[in-house]
Amino acid sequence: MRVLKTYSLDDIFEKGLLMLIPFYIFSHEKNFPEYNSNGQKLAELKAEYQKILKRLDELEQQGVIGTFDKRTIIELSNDVIKEIAQKYENVKKGVGDIMGGALIETEARTILNQGIKQGKTQGISETKKLTALRMLKMGKLTIEEIAECSELSVAEAEQLAGLQAV
């Protein structure tokens, strides 16, 4: 029979066993009743989880882990906390808020999402223009009809017609 080794938080980070972080909370489970009723003990537990987030941030900034990996660790940690601390509202809320709060939209994520949105908008615009150019080459529709079918303005369709004539 093999006994699982219990790793300290330092062991987990030093050995690169970051996927154990979500399960690290199990090492505190026996103390949940105390954490739930003792504000000082709960504050110490919360401080430990803030330290975990800080260390994950540092690893991300150093390029050791990517944003996706960090986010996955945090989400899994949050899921484990919610599950095993169900009977301990203060623990669930205290530590859960720390881990859940780390999932708030970051500036980098916001910029990425804006870039994706802008890319989609540009792609749609280019598709409309290509559609209009195909219709112009066919030569069967008026500029107004092409504008309507391609969802371009008449001015944009006229501009494309001018470019095609060149």
Image (cartoon, rainbow, N blue to C red):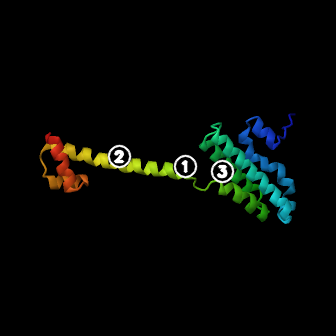
9 horizontally vs 137: left or right: right
As helix, strand or loop, the secondary structure at mark 2 comes to: helix
The quadrant holding residue 133 is top left
Residue type, mark 3 in image: Glu
Q: Residue at x 70, y 49 (%)?
A: 53
Residue type, mark 1 in image: Ala
Can residue 35 be seen here?
Answer: yes
- Mark number displayed over residue 108: 1
144 horizontally vs 103: left or right: left
Label 1 and label 3: CA atoms lie apart by 18 Å
As helix, strand or loop, the secondary structure at mark 3 comes to: helix
Image quadrant for the N terminus? top right
x then y, percent, for residue 4: 84, 38
Eye-nearest disc, 2 or 3: 2
Residue at the disc numbered 2: 123
Residue type, mark 2 in image: Gly
Closer-to-camera residue (83/44): 44
Q: Residue at x 76, y 34 (%)?
A: 15
x then y, percent, for residue 75: 66, 50
